[in-house]
Amino acid sequence: MDEKKLVIDAHDIYYKELNEMVRDAILNKDYNIVELDNVNGQRYIGDAIEKEATIIINGVPGNDLGAFMSGPTIIVNDNVQDAVGNTMSLGKIVVHGQASDVIGYGMRGGKIFIKGDVGYRVGIHMKAYKERMSYIVAGGNAGDFFGEYMAGGILVLLGLEEEDERPIVGDYLGTGMHGGIIYVRGEVNKKKLGKEVGIVDMTDADMKELEKLLKEYAADLDLDYENIMSKPFLKIIPVSHRPYGRLYAY
């Protein structure tokens, strides 16, 4: 496909107007690359767009970046705020900085790659359906409730900052989780695990899955793949498919 690119200076453009400009460029004027300069907190960028295109963001977008998205690739050359990839179905979001809370809430497909740290409740209610998988890879540390109520998909936490003395993940890891897999590079204090999950041995199939995913992650974020794979990984899965079944009255 031939490249058709539009550059928009987002300085002082109200978020509704900016999103209308992006949607019009991709959906009505067939631009396949839209680059936004000077983004400063405008929210809902890329939301609900169902078409392949690339959106490049220079600056910090606001909440709900790529929500309900199905197709586009969003590249952010800075940090992002809350609820990136909220309920997204397809596509990819690559963040060259850090991310805040509730990343990938309810996502049912696609990939979110974060270079640095992530906040609280990342991957909450993540899902997978038949051949459609959802993936989140974070290169730094994570806050509490990583993978909370996760129902499917794959979460990977890398902790690549070797000088960082904080625990790689906060408390309540995988609380309420009843599907999917969490991989953590390095060690995790078992006291941080939710009651619904356990640590099991890695298999050859796990390593094959990780190698494919992390080669793509490293390439997208210009990181050293061999360094990423230089430490062993833990595999965390749910120990029950109905962790709260006894609470139901029927």
Image (tube, rainbow, N blue to C red):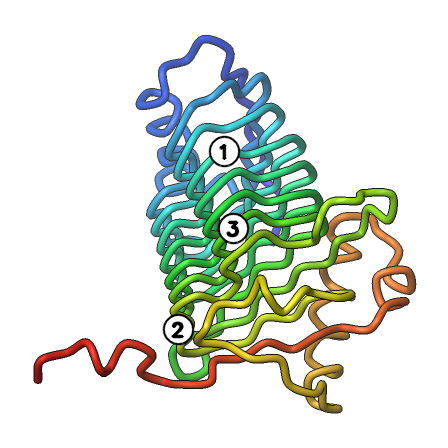
Front residue of 23/68: it is 68
N-terminal label among 2 and 1: 1
Query: Is residue 152 shown left or right of residue 78?
Result: left
Q: Quadrant of residue 90?
A: bottom left
Q: Identify the disc placed on residue 144.
A: 3
The relative height of residue 215 versus residue 238 in the rendered view (above or below) is: above
The relative height of residue 81 versus residue 40 in the rendered view (above or below) is: below
Residue at the far left: name it: 250
Mark 2 → mark 3, Cα distance in angstroms: 18 Å
Q: Position of residue 243 (x, y in %)?
A: 33, 79
Mark 2 → mark 1, Cα distance in angstroms: 24 Å
The relative height of residue 195 versus residue 2 in the rendered view (above or below) is: below
Q: Quadrant of the N terminus?
A: bottom right
Query: Is residue 178 shown left or right of residue 119?
Result: left
Say which amino acid is labelled 3: Asp
Q: Which residue: 82% across, 73% down? A: 232
Q: Position of residue 240 (x, y in %)?
A: 40, 85
Q: Quadrant of residue 214?
A: bottom right
Q: Quadrant of the C terminus?
A: bottom left
State the residue position of label 1.
Answer: 81
Q: Secondary structure at mark 1?
A: loop
Q: Which residue: 64% across, 38% down? A: 98
Front residue of 93/127: it is 127
Q: Which residue: 62% across, 26% down? A: 58
Q: Secondary structure at mark 2?
A: strand
Say which amino acid is labelled 1: Gln
Q: Which residue: 61% across, 36% down? A: 76
Say which amino acid is labelled 2: Ala
Front residue of 85/169: it is 169
Q: Position of residue 23 (x, y in %)?
A: 37, 36
State the residue position of label 2.
Answer: 151
